[in-house]
Image (cartoon, helix red, strand yellow):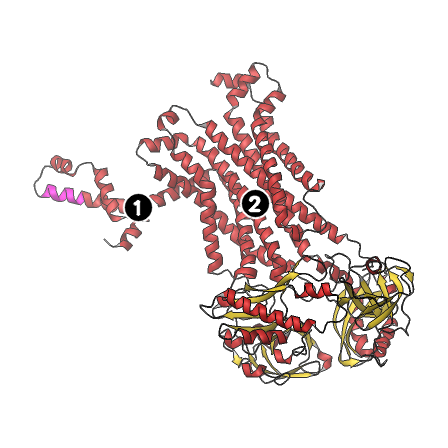
Amino acid sequence: MSLWSRLANVFRGDRLSRELDEEMQWHIEEAIQQGREPGEVRRSFGPMLSRREESRDIRIIPWLDSLRADAVLGYRQLMKRKVTSAAAILSLALAIGACTSAFRLIDALLLRPLPVASPGQLYELVRVGNGLVDDKPARQDSWPYPSFELMRDAAKGQAELLALSNSASTDLTFRSDAEMEKARVQYVSGRMFGSFGLRPSAGRLLTENDDRHPGAHPYAVLSWDYWRRRFGMDPSVVGRGFRIGDDLFQIVGVGPELFTGTETGTVTDIFIPTMMHPGVRRDDWTWMRTLARVHAGVALEPLRARLDATSHAFEEERAKGFTGMSKESVERFLDQRVELEPAAAGASGLQEDYRVSLAAIGALVLLVLLIACANVANLMTAQAASRAREMALRVSIGAGRARLVQLVLVESAWLAILAAVIGALFASWSAPFVVSRINPPDHPVRLSLPADWRVLAFGIALTAGVTLLFGLAPALRASAIKPATALKGGSNAQARGRLMHALIALQVAFCFVALFVAGLFAATFHRLSDRPLGFSTERLLTLDTVTRRAEAPVLWDQVAEHLRAVPGVESVAVSGWELISGRSWNGFVSVNGGPPGPVLAYYLNVSPGWIDVMKIHLVEGRDFLPTDTAPGEAIVNETFVKQFLPAGRPLGQSIAKGKDVYRVIGVAKDAPYKDIHERILPSVYVPFHSVDAKGVGRPVREATFIVRTSAQNPLALASTLRREVPGARAEFRVSNIRTQQELVLAQTVRERLLAMLGLFFAGVALLLVGVGLYGVLDYFVLQQRREIGIRAAIGAQAGHIARHATAGVFAMVLAGGVAGVASGMASARFIGTLLYQVKATDLGALALPPLAILITALVAATPAVVRAVRIDPAAILRSE
C-alpha cells in the first residue's frame, strides 16, 4: 500500500473501519461457501476487533492516527470549557502577537539583509574614542572624502570601499523655481550599483566612470519607489533633468524595485555620484559613511589595522593645521580607533538610536509572554486534577507515558495555534502602528515589514516554544500519575500546589520587572517633556528658507520686514537655523587673548530681536543692533559665563573662535541648543550679518525666519507665509514650515514610544498576574473546602479562614516581589542610555510596582476569600 493511501486512510477512519468489516465478512462468507462450518470459520479468524485493528494499523500511519485522535479530543476539551479556553487563548494571543510584532521591527531594522549580492560581506567603518565635549565613549560614522580615498587605496586587493552620504531631504525643481519640491537625495560611489550586483529597471545605473572628477558628471538615478510615486513609472523620465541649487542633473536610469538605499529606515529617492558633492575635496567636512565589501577569505583584523593606520596618519596631518584648539583637545581628537561593524542590514542613524530601545521592548514582550505561559500552565495543572481519573483509566488500559504526554501537548498546541492565529492579526496591525509613531517632522520612518518566510518561521518556532513552555510540565505530571492512587480518589494536590505557587512567584517577579522598567520609561518621558527650555514655543512658527544663490543679509532683513506686516504676525527674526533642530556649529573658545580651552561651545547667527521673539530672558547687557556684525559683538548664555568667565563682569570681555574675535555685550538665560537630551553647553549668539576680513558682508543662501503669531494655531498662517516670502523677494523660497513645538516633540519621539509601549505591556502583565492569582486562589479554595468547612465548624473566624486560604499565595507574591526588585535593579543597567534624569533607586520607581501588584493581588483574592468564608460547614460534613 502506498504512503499516500496510508496517509489518506488516517482521515477516513469510519469509512476505513466499514471497509475492513466488509472485507472480513466477505472472507468469512467465502469460507462458509467453500463448505466449512460457520463456527469453525469464526473461531479460526479469532477476535474480530483485534483482527480489524491489526488490519487497520497496516493501512494507516499509526503515530499520525493517534495524533489525529488526540487533536480531536483536545478540541473537544477546549469546547467543553469555552470561557476558560477563550481567556487562555486571548492572553496568549496578545503575548504572541506582541512578540511577533517586536520581531518584525527588529528584523526590519537590524537583521534583514539588504537586497544586494552577498550582504554578509558588508561592513561599516566607524571611529570609536572619547567625545570632544566630554570623556564619554563616542562613536562616529562620518568621514571626509580625502580620508576615504586614502583608505580605499590602502584596502585594494582586500576590500572594496564605498562612500555614501546620508539620505537628506533636498530642495529640487523639475520645472521652475515656483514648483520646488523635496526629495531624499544620497551621494554614492559610482561603483556602488555594480558592487551590489544591481540591475536597472529603466535606463542605466551609475558607474565608476561617473565618479572620477569633481562636478564632471551631473547624472542621477531614481529609486524604483520614487519612480512609481512621483512619475507613475513613466519610462520617458529617463533623459529628463532637474536642478538642485545651481546644478542641473540628468536622469540616466531607475534602480531595481527592491533596493531603496543603504540607510535602513529611509527610502532614498535619488542617487547622485559623490563627486557632485560640494565637500568632496574638503578635508574638514565629514559628510559620508564608508562601507567596505570585504573579499572572501580576507581576515578582518589585519584589514582593520591597515585602515586604522591610514586614517590616523591622515588625521595627524590634518591636525597640524588646527587653530584655536588646545593640545589636550587635539590629543583627544586623535585618540580614535577604526572598527569594522557588520552592515549586512545597512547602516543608519535610526539603527543606532533604536537598537537598545527595540531590545528593551523585546524584553518587555518576552516577560508578558512568560507571564501568559505561566498562567496557562497553572490553568492546565488545575485541569489535570479534574482529569486524574481519566488519565488513570488510560494508563490502566495500556496507554504509555509517551502517549499521555502527547495527549496533553496536543491540547496545549491547540491553545497555542489558535492564539498564534489571533496574534498574527494583532502583529499585522501593531508593527506598522509602532513604525507610524516614529515620525519626526519631514522624516517619517519607512520600514519594509513583509509577512514572508522569516516571519512565518519565527511564528512557527514561537508557537512550538510556547506549547512546550506551558504544556510540558503539566504533560509530564499527568503522565506520571499512579492509577491505583487516582482511582481510589487520592491525588498529588500538594505537588501540584508547589508547582502552581512557583509559577505565581515567577509571574510576580516578571510583572515587577515590567512595571519597574515601564515606570522608568514613563518618568523619563515626563521629565524630558517638562524640562525647562528657557524659551517659549507658544505660537512660534519656523520657515526654513533657501535662495537659488547666496544673497546679501540685507535682503533677508527686507523679507523679514515684509513678513512683519502680514496680518496675524506678531514679530519676526532670522537665525541660521532653529533651536533643537539637530543642527550645530561649534568651536573652541579663547578668552581675553588666552589659549583655547578644552571645552566646545555652540555658535548661532541670529538677527536683532531674535532674543525677544524666542522670549529668552536677557540677564544683563543688551540685544544686537542692526549695525552689529560678526565677528564683533556676541551674546553668551549663563553656562558660558560659568565655564569661561567665572571672575568679574562678563560684559566687555573678549572671546575668540580661531581668528574671529567677539566682545560680549549680553548674557542670556540658558536654553538647549541642539538636542533636548544633552546638558546645557556654553552657547554664543553672534550677529546674523557676517563680514569677511575686508569688512565685506558675506552672502547667505539658507536661513530660518522665526515668526511669532498672534493666533493660537501658528500653522493657520503657514500657507500665507509660504506665499509672502517669494512675494517679498522672488529669489527666496520656503523649503519647510514647522512649529517650534513640533521640533520639541520630535526630540521626544523615542521616549514617548517607549513610555506608551512600556505602560501598555506593564498593564497587560498586571492584568495577567491578576487573572493568574484569581485562578490559583479559586482552585485552592475548591481543593481545601473540606478543611475550611471543618475549621469553620470548630469556630474559626472569617479572618482566620481568609488568611488560611490566601497565606500560601501571598507568600509567593512576596517572594516574587523580592526577586523582581533584584531583577529590576539589574535590568536598569542595560537601559541606562534610554533614561533621562531618572535612577533605578528613585523611591517612586521602587514603590509603584509593589503597590500596583499588592492592589491587584487583593482584588484578585476577594472572590476566593468570599467563597471561602461562605462555605457551609454542615453541607461539607454531610457530604463526607
Q: Earlier in the sequence, mark 1 or mark 2?
A: 1
Cα separation between marks 1 and 2: 41 Å
The residue wearing badge 1 is 13
- Can you see residue 568? no
The quarter holding residue 595 reads bottom right
Q: Which residues are magenta?
A: 25-33
Give the side of residue 297 with respect to residue 207, left or right: left
- How busy is the neighbourhood of tag 2: few (under 14 within 10 Å), some, or many (20 plus)? many
In front here: 793 or 578?
578
Query: Closer to us: mark 1 or mark 2?
Result: 2
Q: Position of residue 93 (x, y in %)?
A: 53, 47
Give the side of residue 85 with respect to residue 631, left or right: left
Q: Main secondary structure of the magenta part?
A: helix
Amino acid identity at mark 2:
Val
The residue wearing badge 2 is 368
Q: Residue at x 10, y 43 (%)?
A: 33
The quarter holding residue 711 reads bottom right
Against 502, residue 112 (above or below) is below
The quarter holding residue 434 reads bottom right
Q: Secondary structure at mark 2?
A: helix
In front here: 446 or 304?
304
Q: Position of residue 218 (x, y in %)?
A: 62, 83
In front here: 611 or 494?
611
Against 119, residue 862 (above or below) is above
